[in-house]
Image (cartoon, grey):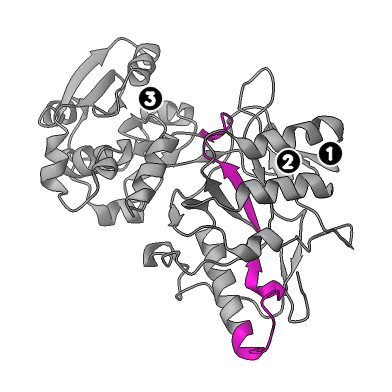
Amino acid sequence: MLGHAGDARSRGGRGRHTLLRGALPEEWTRARLGGSHGGGRREALPFRLAPAPGAARHHGLRGVRAVAHPLLDSVPPVPRSLRPQGGPAQPDPRHQTAWGHIFILYPDDENGVNGILRPYLEAHPPLVAREQVVESDVEQRFWVVDDPQVIDAIVKEMAPKRNLIIADGHHRYETALNFRDEMWRKYPDAPANAAFNYTMVTLVSMSDPGLVILPTHRLIHSYGQMGGPEARERARDYFEVTTVADRGAMERALAEATPDHPRFGFYDGAYAVLELRDPGVLERLLPDRAPDWRLLDVTVLHELFIERVLGIDKAAVERKENINYLRDPGPGYEAVDRGEAQFLLLMNPTRIEQVRACTAASERMPQKSTDFYPKVISGLVALPVGPEERL
């Protein structure tokens, strides 16, 4: 299945990531999707392509889409804060067809899977194309690859992959596990290739140049403890605070940040750039967390500025009492100018190598630290998972 993008104006994901530590099981190499299009069953390997936003030539974010693979129990459970009210997600027994998918990143330094798929894409038109279904300026394009040689080459390339990361879809994964367990109890003699043992996934190379992570900015509102000048002055306990002339100067300064000295922008009608002065302060405050996690921009912003400078604690952040999250900073600037909010905090995007390092250290990414773009839509591929379905 393929997706195709125009720019980066759209809604994003939850920013929780889980590492799948094992290799893809042997059964994965023998599996073929029992999906459907127009009611017909295909033995095929769908995938998607989403080009880099703003690129003159669209070539990026290629990944195998909706490959059925055995569920991996090594995935930690979804944390309670992410679960719907009422406890863990439960399957709906009335529906025995899976329409959703899980977004997974896989290591592929040479982008070998992309190289296998590229000639097929260039030689075949998409089966389905849909514009602006979910994200603005995004055309979703879907191919069905049913060439046995291409499929076998991709299976061979993917089979030894380890350390896969669930980037989005933890609720769907947990629901699939619950459904599988329920079906095991009802049908204990079902074979290993029973469809309910599988789920659909979107697989994207971590090294694909089209894999885009957008920043999520923070808008502080309904806050009366201090004004901008006092907040900037108190921030000097942890940050180098530099006043700049305008928005352009602030954004240029953010782009020059280094990994060990994260920066973020501060707007309260005036512009400033705050740069972490001493990374050691986070080691002292958070000794049990991995070094890579401590230096995430979101960690620095929340632990030092939002909590210790502004005095907004974690519980208030969780309840969103004083904070809104924005992909587009434009409305945030306007809200501050109209007096509807006090501060806009401008973020740099999380880098994919940071996600990879944190998950390798068994750290979960902080809330709203990643926004992968674009995302393939659900609903165009179905996986029947009833008790008689076999893959």
In reply to whether residue 186 is colored magenta, the answer given is yes
Residue 182 screen position, x and y as percent? 59, 83
Q: Residue at x 48, y 68 (%)?
A: 84
The earlier-in-sequence mark between 2 and 3 is 2
* For the residues bearing labels 3 and 1, Cβ distance under 8 angstroms: no
Q: Specify whether 277 is left or right of 50.
A: left
Please state the total of marks drawn on the protein image.
3
Q: Secondary structure at mark 1?
A: loop
* For the residues bearing labels 2 and 1, Cβ distance under 8 angstroms: yes
Q: Is residue 139 visible?
A: no
Q: Which residue is mark 1?
A: 126
Q: Quadrant of the C terminus?
A: bottom right
In reply to whether residue 321 is colored magenta, the answer given is no
Residue 13 screen position, x and y as percent? 51, 47
Magenta stretch bounds: 183-212
Q: CA distance from mark 2 to mark 3?
A: 41 Å
Nearer the observer: mark 2 or 3; the answer is 2
Q: Which residue is mark 2?
A: 2
Q: Specify whether 82 is left or right of 220.
A: right
Mark seen at residue 337: 3
The earlier-in-sequence mark between 2 and 1 is 2
Q: In the image shown, does 51 or 253 lie closer to the viewer?
A: 51
